[in-house]
Amino acid sequence: MVDTIKITLEGVTESRLPQTDFNNLPFGKVYTDHMFMADYRDGQWKNFRIVPYGHMLVSPATPAIHYGQSIFEGMKAYLGTNGEVLIFRPHDNLQRLNLSADRMCMPPVPEEIFMEGLRELLHVDKAWIPSAPGSSLYIRPFVFSADEYIGIRPSQDFTFMIIMSPVGAYYSNPVKVKIETHYTRAVAGGTGYAKAGGNYGGAIYPTKLAAQEGFHQLIWTDGVKHEYIEESGTMNVMFVFNDTLVTPALSDSILAGITRDSIVKLAQSWGMKVEERKVSVKEIVAHLTQGTLQEAFGVGTAATIANIEAIGYEGNLYTLPPVEQRVIAHKIYQELDAIKRGTQPDRFGWIMKL
Ligand code: COI
């Protein structure tokens, strides 16, 4: 354990801020001036530093490259109305990072290192937090094996880093998704519940095939019989029918989304009926064919609330009610966004203020 950490700062000689077009922020292409780094060596986290964002040296033999021993998180910071920095549920991200670390045989990142690194980095790069509606500062903490060893074994050396990116919407329009019934994202006993790099890498090919058919994303189903809905790529998925918010119950093949959890709590606080349970493909297709599926949307840190306009299943395309008529997704987006930006009281204790 570490009691206090000392972070060194090597600042940039010239900020890239003046060349950054804040009116045109694609997701994940622009990075702030600095990044936070820490090394795990000889069984201890050490060498805490903030350095200019940029390429870095890693061994070509690192297991992170060869075997995908890497995990990550996604979180967001906002600028409050009085110029204060508001971070949404960072302790939950830390908890999930360490759950992923455990599954991937990595050391946990102590709270002090995570929070102090985050605070200091945000302090140094505060001017990069966008304030326009719909934009935010996306924060990407990650850990990877830094061993120089090509054999397979639990690694000994690791690197923990935080990089940050001012972003606009991940999906700028409602999405068309395909229920995937051949490829599999995760199975029971696998790494689906962890935010492990390989879960995402393995999804790229099936998602590319779906994109060739005109879909923006997949809805993954269980890896055994493809009978139950699990999650969508980059986000959890939620449905509204019979005026009830329905989402697949968490399992070891579904990522425990922090946005998902926030929405469940928010909807319950309104007195809305919420069901977290197994959701069969059959049930969703029945609602689609009967026209009783009121809403469907993906939820995630990057995606926020991504309305689903159409769902493809076994060669059929089912169109949902027009997005402009969606009441629940709209209400969720508005209230969650207001809490994150500090324009509504933080009644759940989700905001960490800097
Ligand atoms: C996030 O929402 O933060 C994610 O990690 C999704 C991502 C793969 C873009």
Image: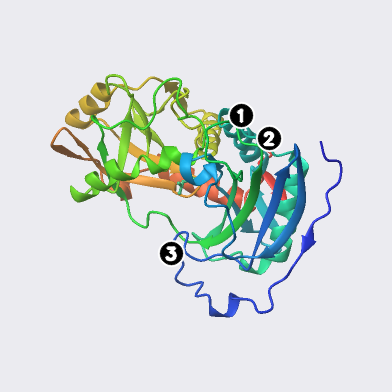
Residue 195 in sight here: yes
Query: Which residue is at a point 65% across and 39% down the rendered structure image?
Result: 94
Measure how far apart labels 3 and 2 are at the Cα level. Answer: 32 Å
Kindly identify which residue carries mark 1.
102
What is the secondary structure assignment of the residue under circle 2? Answer: loop
Query: Which residue is at a point 56% across and 32% down the rendered structure image?
Result: 104
Residue 114 in sight here: no
Mark sitting earlier along the chain (1/3): 3
Looking at the image, which is closer to me, 260 or 39?
39
Residue contact between numbered discs 1 and 2, judged by CB atoms under 8 Å: yes
Residue 153 location in percent, x, y? 57, 31
Residue 159 location in percent, x, y? 65, 47
User: Mark 2: few, some, or many residues within 10 Å (few <14, many ≥20)?
Assistant: some
Quadrant (top left/top right/bottom left/bottom right) for the C terminus = bottom right
Looking at the image, which is closer to me, 152 or 22?
152
Amino acid type at circle 1 is Asp
> Residue 147 appears in which quarter of the rendering?
top right
Q: Is residue 130 left or right of residue 286?
A: right
Residue 221 location in percent, x, y? 32, 28
Amino acid type at circle 2 is Pro
Q: Is residue 137 above or below residue 88?
A: below
Kindly identify which residue carries mark 3.
26
Disc 3 within 8 angstroms of ligand 1 (CB):
no
Residue contact between numbered discs 3 and 2, judged by CB atoms under 8 Å: no
User: Which of the numbered marks, if any, corresponds to residue 235?
Assistant: none
Colouring scheme, one of rainbow, by chain, secondary structure, one colour: rainbow
Quadrant (top left/top right/bottom left/bottom right) for the N terminus = top right
User: Mark 3: few, some, or many residues within 10 Å (few <14, many ≥20)?
Assistant: some
What is the secondary structure assignment of the residue under circle 3? Answer: loop
Mark sitting earlier along the chain (1/2): 1
Measure how far apart labels 1 and 2 are at the Cα level. Answer: 7 Å
User: Which of the numbered marks, if any, corresponds to residue 108?
Assistant: 2
